[in-house]
Image: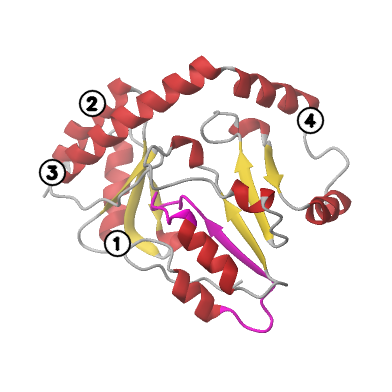
Amino acid sequence: PVAVAERNLRIDVDALLSAVTERTRIVFVANPNNPTGTFITPAEIARLRAELRSNIMLVVDEAYCEYVADPEYSSVLQMVDAKAENVIVLRTFSKFYGLAGLRVGWAYAPRFAVDALSRVSGPYAVSRVALEAAQAAMRDQAHCDAARRHNDIWLAWTSEHIRSLGYETTDSVCNFVTMKIPGGAEAAVAFDKKLCSLGFVGRLAHQNALPDWLRLTIGSAEAMQTLIPALETLIE
């Protein structure tokens, strides 16, 4: 696989297109992105697809899409509906629906791609329990609405308070805030360890070529209100 650098912490469509070679068969993008929480618009996704060769499959991972409130964002499921033969959209129940332990998700794709995936997947890839839980989660609209409202409130609140302490954050639209730790990669590791000792477990983004960034997931109101004073104690 070839990793393509982002521009201003967002997917760079031009860089993706420049990285395509004769050997390229799949272009994979996460939109919204993890760990930055940023996104590109459907128009940019459409431009990316339009400029790819027809034998290159564009796979769009929309794992965090249910959290997004920004009106400029929307899913690209309609590309598949419009008979795009080289687009696959991925979704999961591990994030918004909270079913990570059940390992269940789905793909929306042209029929030939679904048939190909079916031939290479295991016979019992998803358990009956996982399927029942996923359907129940989707039917529980009241819980979905409450979860979305909670995230809208506390994502904005947490981002604002972290920035007020002098930290840079990404423009995340997901269920996490990603903050830059001053001093580089080693400082970020030390910061993460100190924060963990205070009872908060973050996730360093070093595996995503962002060694001095730390991702913090939105939790309960109590947890977020406790996080900010903890961060204040770590300011040098």
Q: Secondary structure at mark 1?
A: helix
**Which amino acid lies under the numbered mark 4 shown in the image of this protein?**
Ser
Q: Which mark is residue 231?
A: none
- Give the percent coordinates (x, y) of residue 35: 42, 52
Protein image colouring: secondary structure
The secondary structure type at the circle numbered 4 is loop
**Residue visible at 61% across and 47% down in the picture:** 77
Does 177 appear in magenta?
no
Give the residue at mark 1: 186
Report if the CB atoms under discs 2 and 1 are less than 8 Å apart: no
Q: Residues within 10 Å of mark 1 (few under 14, many from 20)?
A: few
Magenta segment: does it hold 38? Answer: yes
How many marks overall? 4
Q: Residue 187: where, in percent of width, then height?
A: 25, 58
**Residue at image location 61% in from the left, 73% down from the top:** 52
Q: Earlier in the sequence, mark 3 or mark 1?
A: 3
Q: Majority secondary structure of the magenta segment? A: loop
Q: CA distance from mark 3 to mark 1?
A: 20 Å
Distance in Å between CA atoms under marks 2 and 4: 38 Å
Helix, strand or loop for disc 3: loop
Answer left or right for 183 relative to 103. left
Which residue is disc 2 drawn over? 225
Would you say the residues marked 2 and 4 are in contact, meaning their CB atoms lie under 8 Å apart?
A: no
Q: CA distance from mark 3 to mark 4?
A: 46 Å
Tag 2 secondary structure: helix
Disc 3 marks a residue whose amino acid type is Leu
Tell me the residue that label 4 is attached to. Answer: 127
**For marks 3 and 2 on the same chain, the one whose residue lies earlier in the sequence:** 3
User: Is label 4 or label 1 in front?
Assistant: 4
> Which segment is the magenta one?
20-42
